[in-house]
Image (tube, coloured by chain):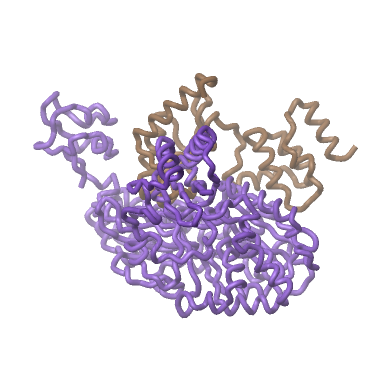
Amino acid sequence: MKTIKVGLGTCGVSAGGEKVYTALKNEIAREKIQVNLLETGCMGNCYNEVLVEVIDETGSSNMYGNVTPDKVKRILDEQVMNDKPIGEWIVKGKDAVAEDTFFAKQKRIVLRNCGIIDPDSIDEYIASGGYQAIQKVLKEYTPEQVIEIILKSGLRGRGGAGFLTGMKWRFCRQAAGDKKYIICNADEGDPGAFMDRSTLEGDPHSVLEGMMIGAYACGADEAYIYVRAEYPMAVRRLRHSIRKATEKGFLGENIFGSKVNLKIKIKEGAGAFVCGEETALIASIEGQRGMPRFRPPFPAQKGLWGKPTNINNVETYANIAWIVMNGAEAFAAMGTENSKGTKVFALAGKIARGGLVEVPMGLTINEIIYDIGGGIRDGKKFKAVQMGGPSGGCIPATMGDLQIDYQKINQTGAIMGSGGMVVVDETTCMVEMAKFFLRFTQDESCGKCTFCRIGTKRMLEILERITDGKGQAGDIELLEDLADKIRNNTICGLGQTAPNPVLTTLKYFRDEYEIHIRDKKCPAHSCAPLLTFTILEDKCTGCTLCARVCPAAAISGEKKKVHKIDQATCIKCGKCFETCNFKAIIKD
Amino acid sequence: MTPNDKLKAQHAKNGLAGFKVDLWNYEGEKGALIPLLQAAQDTYGYIPETAIDQISEIVGIPAAEIYGVITFYSQFRLKPLGKFLIKICDGTACHVNGSERIAGTIEDELQISGNDTTEDGLFTLQKVACLGCCSLSPVIMINDETYGRLTPKKVQQLLKEYKTKAQNPQTA
C-alpha cells in the first residue's frame, strides 16, 4: 500500500498544512482510496511548504511542494491511484523535473527521522532503530565507558558554547553526592533559530533516548526538559512521547528491565531569553526569577536544588544514540580537526531556499548559501550572514570561503551559536542590525549586573542616535569602549556576548557606521530618517494616491499632474513609496 | 480537610471557577510556583490578585516575592487580554523581511500600539522575539493560528476577517 506523508511541524501547519491534511483525509475517505496517510515533522525544505510526500510500495517517492487543498484531488487521482507523476509540482524524488541541490551536501544525523517518521508513534521510532542504543548501553557498558565513547567522538555542546560533552558528563559523574539531575535545555530563545523546535516536533524520542543515556552516564535518576512556552506543539509531542515511553517501561522504575530508574518531567518556560543560560534556567525550574548565578560552582558540582546537574542542548542529546550505535570513530570521521560531526542550521532571511539544514562541519559558508540555499532571493547580492543570534556576529560575504568550524568562526568575532543563520543582502543596514540585536539583549537583560543593565542601554541609545541621523564624532570609539567594559564585567553569557553584533559589524562594515555619522546617510537605503523620498517627474501619472496616504500632508499636486514632496514636512514614513503603483517614487 | 480541599471550598465560595487540575493535584513538590502561575493564567487569561494570594498560601512564598517572579517573565499578565491576542514576530528573519511594516500596519488599523488592548476589548498586541517559523517570514500569530508570508494588504484583510468573526460568532 502506498503511503502519503504531510510535513506538519509548526511552520508546516502555519503554511496551511493542516488544511491540506484534512483535504487529503476527506478525499481518501470519499473515494475509499487504499493508502496510509501520516503526519510527520519538518522535512527541511521549508521554502517549498506545504510538503506532501507520496511513497510507493517499493519505497521510492515523489515529494510534492507548495501543495494547497485544491491540488489534492489531482495528486490522489494521478500520482497515488495511477502512478502518473505531476512533474511540475514535484520538488524532490524520482520524477522531479528539476530537483534543486538543497539536500545534496547535507548529512542528516540529528534529523535522521525528521520528516520521515510519525513523531507521535513510538513504534515507528523503534522500527527505525530507536531505543537500541540505550539498551546496548545498559547491557554492555559501564557509565565510565559511555563517557569514554562520547569523549572519543569529539561531540561538542550544540547549544552555542561548544564545550566537550564527554567532559561535561565526566564532571557530573565525578561530583560527590547520590542525587543528581539531567536537564535538557529546550529554551531556544535565539530569534531566527528553529533547530530545536523542529527536532522536538519531528523526533522527540531521539532526545529522550539521548537523555536516558546521559542520565545513566552521569548517575542521575531525575530529568527535566525545559521547553519555552512559545513551542506548544513541541510540549505536546514531548508529553505524549514521555507517556508512551513510560507505558512501555522505558521510563520510570527499572527502565528496560535494568536497575536504573529515570523520571523525565517537563517544565515550560515563561518568556525569558536569559533562561537559556544554564544557571538562570535552573533558577527558573526552582520557581525563581531567572537570574544567572556566578560560576564556579558549575552546575556539574552544584546545580538544581544544589545537586550535581548536567545540562545539554536538545541537539546534543539527539546525537547521542547515533554515536552509540555507529561508534565514536564514525562520528569523528566527519567534520574538522576540532569540530566533529554535523551541525543543524536554521537557514533564513534573504536566502532563496530557507529551511532546516544539517551539514558536516567543515563545509564552507558559500556552500551553504549557494549550493544548499540557492543564493539570494530576487537577484540581490549576498552581503553578510548573521550567526549565533544576539550573541553572535555578522560574517561578511568576502569571507564566504570560511569553513563551518568552532575555532574558525570564533576567530572572526562571531560564534557558531545554536545554529541560527540569517542571511542579508544589500538592502539590509548593518548598523540597524546591530541596533536590532542590542534592543533585544537590552530588553532581555535580567538586570543583575550593572554593566549589562546600563551598558547595553547606553549602547542602544548611541545606535538609535546614529540611525536617527544624530550620530556624533566619537560615537564609534564610545561604542567600542562600552563593549569592552560590558564583556569583562558581567557574570553570564548574555552580557558577555551582547556587544558582539556591534563589534563584528564595526569590524567588517565600519564604513557604514561612518557614513551614517558623518554624512547622515544610509548606504542600504534602510534607515528611514536618513532617506530622502523624491517623486520622479517622468514617471508620475498624477493619480494622487500618494498624497492621499501621506500622514503628514507633505505631498501636493493636482490630478493627472506631477506631484511633489515637501522635504521639510516629510516624516520619512515611506507610505508613499509603498503605495505608488508606477515606481515613480525613489528613496535614497 | 486537606489544604487543597479548603482551597476548593474557598474558590467555590468566592465564585471563582476552579483552577486547572494542576492546582488541586499540587503535592508539595518543589519548584511548583511557575507551573501554578501558568495554570492560573490558562484558567483566567491573566493572573488575578486573588489567585496570587491563594497560590501564596499554597506554596508558602510571600505574595511580594511572587509578584517579583510574575513581573520577571514576559508571559505573565496581570491584566486581562483582549479576545484576540496578536503576537507580532520581530525575530531576526522576520525583522529582515519587513516585520516593522506589518507591525505599523496593525497599529494603524487598530489604533493601538505597544502591548495595548483595543477599547472594544477585541485585540491585544504583543511583539515577540521569535515564533520559530522563519521560512514564512514575516509572521504573526492570532491566538493559536499562525499566519506567514504576510504583506500589509494581507494583514489588513486578516484583521477585517477577525472583526467580522467577532461580530458574527455563529459564522466563525
Farthest front residue in view: A82
Against A187, residue A86 (above or below) is: above
Against A230, residue B18 (above or below) is: above
Classify residue B118 as left or right of residue A371.
right
Give the percent coordinates (x, y) of residue A421: 41, 59
Q: According to the colouring, which chain is purple?
A: A
Against A471, residue A549 (above or below) is: above
The quarter of the picture where residue A308 lies is: bottom right
Residue beneath the point at 14% across and 31% down = A563
Whether residue B140 appears in this view of the structure is no
Residue beneath the point at 55% across and 63% down = A315
Farthest right residue in view: B1
Q: According to the colouring, which chain is brown?
A: B
Give the percent coordinates (x, y) of residue A455: 47, 58
Residue beneath the point at 66% across and 63% down = A131
In front here: A354 or A78?
A78
The quarter of the picture where residue A302 lies is: bottom right
In front here: A124 or A36?
A36
Residue beneath the point at 35% across and 38% down = B151
Whether residue A229 appears in this view of the structure is yes
Farthest left residue in view: A538
In front here: B14 or A61?
A61
Classify residue B63 as left or right of residue A588.
right
Give the percent coordinates (x, y) of residue A28: 51, 37
Against A84, residue B125 (above or below) is: above
